[in-house]
C-alpha cells in the first residue's frame, strides 16, 4: 500500500515537473538593439493576450499558434539600458534588460520658405498625421510578409532616416522616414506583402498610402502622384502601389516610412530580417 502511494506520488510529481517545463515561457528578442531599429519579440508560452511593456508603452502581441509575436520600436532617444517585460494582466511572464547601442543619424540644416514652414504647424497637417496614427492603433493583423523586404523604389537615397533637422536656423524636427530620389511617375512597389489600410491627401504629406504588414508593422508613402491600388486591397511583394510625385509642395521623390505600432524605425532594417522572421 505504501509502495503504491509512493509510486503514485512520484508519478504526480513527474507529471507536474513536465507540465511546468512545458509551460515555462521562453522569450526571444532578435534584431539589432540599436536606437531607431525594430525589435523582434516572440514568446513561447500558454498565455491569454500578452503585451510587450517597453519604453513606457504597451504593445499587443499576435498569436501564431505556437508563439506570440510583436515587432516593437526602439526609439531614437531610447535609454542605453532599458527593460522589456511580457505582461499577462498584471503578471510578468518574462523580462529582459537590454543594452541599447546609441546611433548618431546626423543633422540636416534646411532653409525653406516661411509659408512652407508654417504648413508644418497647420492644424490640418497635424490632423493628417494623427489620422495615420489612429489607423495603426486599430489594426491587429497576423504576419503578412514572407522573406526579406525590398526597396519600394529603385532610386538613390537622398535623405536618411533619423536625421535631426533645423529649419531656418530655429525650428527643430527629425526625419521619420527615408527619401528616395525617384523621378516623377516612377513606379512605387510594395516592399512586402500587406494590405492597404489608409489612402488620403495631406496638405504636407500629399497623396498618402499606408500598408499593414502585420504584427504591428506598417509602411507609409508620401508625395505620390497617384495610386495603383484601391482602399482595403491586398498587395503582394513587388506589386505596383503608386507612382513617385511631389504632391504636398515638394520636388518629386518618395518619402518612405516603416512604423511599428506607430513608432518610426529604420526602414532598411527590414531588408535583412532575422532568419525565423522571414
Image (spheres, rainbow, N blue to C red):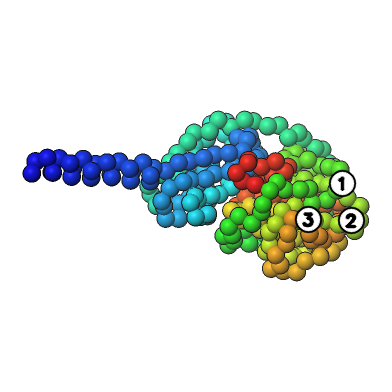
The reply to whether callout 1 and callout 2 are in contact (CB within 8 Å) is yes
Q: Is residue 26 visible?
A: yes
User: Counting other residues with Cα less than 10 Å from the Cα at mark 1, is it few (<14), some (14-19), or many (20 or more)?
Assistant: some
User: Counting other residues with Cα less than 10 Å from the Cα at mark 2, is it few (<14), some (14-19), or many (20 or more)?
Assistant: some
Relative image position of residue 162 (x, y in whole percent): 72, 40
> Which residue ends up furthest to the left in the rendered image?
1
> Considering the numbered disc 1 on the image, is that residue within a helix, a strand or a loop?
loop
Residue in the foreground of this view, choosing between 208 and 235: 235
Whether residue 50 sits left or right of residue 221 in the image: it is left
Q: Residue at x 69, y 68 (%)?
A: 232
CA distance for labels 3 and 2: 14 Å
Using the image, determine if residue 22 lies above or below residue 103: below
Relative image position of residue 83 (x, y in whole percent): 49, 37
Labelled disc at residue 186: 2
Q: Residue at x 82, y 56 (%)?
A: 188
Disc with the residue nearer the chain's start (1 vs 2): 1
Q: Quadrant of residue 221?
A: bottom right
Disc with the residue nearer the chain's start (3 vs 1): 1
Disc with the residue nearer the chain's start (3 vs 2): 2
User: Counting other residues with Cα less than 10 Å from the Cα at mark 3, is it few (<14), some (14-19), or many (20 or more)?
Assistant: some
Q: Is residue 130 visible?
A: no
Residue in the foreground of this view, choosing between 12 and 129: 12
CA distance for labels 3 and 1: 15 Å
Relative image position of residue 133 (x, y in whole percent): 64, 57
Which mark is nearer the camera, 3 or 1? 3
Labelled disc at residue 155: 1
The reply to whether callout 3 and callout 2 are in contact (CB within 8 Å) is no
Judging by the rendered image, the residue that carries numbered circle 3 is 238
CA distance for labels 1 and 2: 9 Å
Q: Residue at x 49, y 55 (%)?
A: 65
Whether residue 55 sits left or right of residue 117 in the image: it is left
The reply to whether callout 3 and callout 1 are in contact (CB within 8 Å) is no
Amino acid at each position: 500500500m505504501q509502495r503504491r502511494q509512493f509510486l503514485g506520488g512520484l508519478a504526480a510529481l513527474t507529471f507536474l515537473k513536465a507540465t511546468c517545463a512545458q509551460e515555462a515561457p521562453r522569450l526571444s528578442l532578435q534584431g539589432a538593439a540599436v536606437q531607431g531599429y525594430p525589435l523582434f519579440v516572440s514568446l513561447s508560452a500558454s498565455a491569454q493576450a500578452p503585451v510587450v511593456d517597453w519604453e513606457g508603452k504597451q504593445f499587443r502581441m499576435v498569436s501564431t499558434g505556437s508563439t506570440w509575436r510583436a515587432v516593437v520600436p526602439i526609439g531614437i532617444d531610447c535609454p542605453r539600458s532599458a527593460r522589456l517585460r511580457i505582461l499577462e494582466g498584471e503578471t510578468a511572464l518574462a523580462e529582459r534588460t537590454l543594452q541599447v547601442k546609441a546611433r548618431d543619424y546626423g543633422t540636416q540644416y534646411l532653409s525653406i520658405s516661411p509659408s512652407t514652414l508654417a504648413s508644418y504647424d497647420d492644424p490640418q497637417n497635424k490632423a493628417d498625421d494623427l489620422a495615420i496614427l489612429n489607423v495603426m492603433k486599430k489594426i491587429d493583423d497576423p504576419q503578412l510578409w514572407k522573406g526579406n523586404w525590398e526597396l519600394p523604389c529603385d532610386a538613390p537615397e537622398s535623405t536618411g532616416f533619423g536625421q535631426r533637422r533645423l529649419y531656418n536656423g530655429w525650428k527643430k524636427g527629425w526625419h521619420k522616414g527615408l527619401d528616395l530620389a525617384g523621378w516623377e511617375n516612377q513606379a512605387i512597389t510594395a516592399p512586402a506583402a500587406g494590405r492597404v489600410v489608409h489612402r488620403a491627401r495631406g496638405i504636407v504629406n500629399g497623396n498618402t498610402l499606408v500598408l499593414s504588414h502585420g504584427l504591428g508593422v506598417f509602411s507609409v508613402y508620401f508625395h505620390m502622384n497617384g495610386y495603383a491600388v484601391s482602399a482595403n486591397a491586398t498587395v503582394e511583394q513587388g506589386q505596383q502601389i503608386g507612382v513617385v510625385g511631389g504632391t504636398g509642395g515638394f520636388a518629386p521623390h518618395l518619402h518612405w516610412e516603416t512604423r511599428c505600432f506607430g513608432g518610426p524605425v529604420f526602414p532598411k532594417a527590414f531588408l535583412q530580417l532575422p532568419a525565423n522572421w522571414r
